[in-house]
Amino acid sequence: MNDILITEEEFVIEAGKHYEGETLKTVYAALSELVNQKKLRPSEAYAYAHYKWCLRDPKAIVAYQEGRDKWIVNDCDTEVTEEVSIVKVNSEWGFEASRIQIIGTPYYDATDYQFIRFDCAHMTWLWKNGNLYQVYA
């Protein structure tokens, strides 16, 4: 509430006992680093523990710059293939499938819960949780 980063111990307690301790510590370290870099607010780091985002796969926690001081951080950890993500991007946004080039690992749970970065027509895009953003390459 006061936008103060919770401690690692508080993070592990909030995340619950269903997740491996060392993985939770790795997730917390990744989130703490994003908070230190001003890419994520402390309250947003708490949300990862509370809502159980990316607690099994710390590598899923990546950020892309959308504006001068605006960063978008992944909160989805269900990996999908490039082929599936191209079809999803094409059907949702109408980009020509043959011109879509997926960048990084695509994550997709539903039409309102995904994180897919891609290039199309010399522009870089990020589809996150139902919204489409143009991002810096």
Image: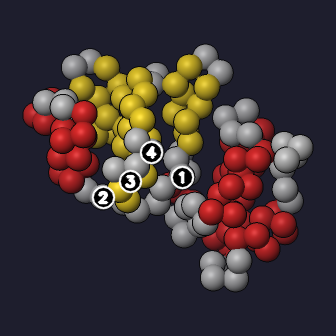
Task: Point out residue 23 in the picture as x, y percentages from the top left corner.
Answer: 63, 70
Work out whether residue 59 or residue 110 is closer to the camera in this orientation and state it: 110
Q: Name the amino acid type tagged 4.
A: Asn
Q: Which residue ends up furthest to the left in the rendered image?
A: 98
Mark 4 in CB contact with mark 3 (< 8 angstroms) = no
Q: Name the amino acid type tagged 2.
A: Val
Q: Is residue 135 above or below residue 98?
A: above
Residue tagged by mark 1? 75
Label 1 Cα crowd, 10 Å radius (few <14 / some 14-19 / many 20+)? many
Q: Which mark is residue 129?
A: 4
Residue tagged by mark 3? 107
Residue tagged by mark 2? 80
Please say which color scheme the image uses. secondary structure
Task: Point out residue 102 in the picture as x, y percentages from the top left corner.
Answer: 28, 40
Q: Is residue 29 above or below residue 125?
A: below
Q: Name the amino acid type tagged 1.
A: Asp
Disc 3 or 1, which lies upstream in sequence?
1
Per the image, label 1 sits on a secondary structure element best described as loop
Q: Nearer the viewer, mark 1 or mark 4?
A: 4
Q: Name the amino acid type tagged 3.
A: Tyr
Mark 2 in CB contact with mark 3 (< 8 angstroms) = yes
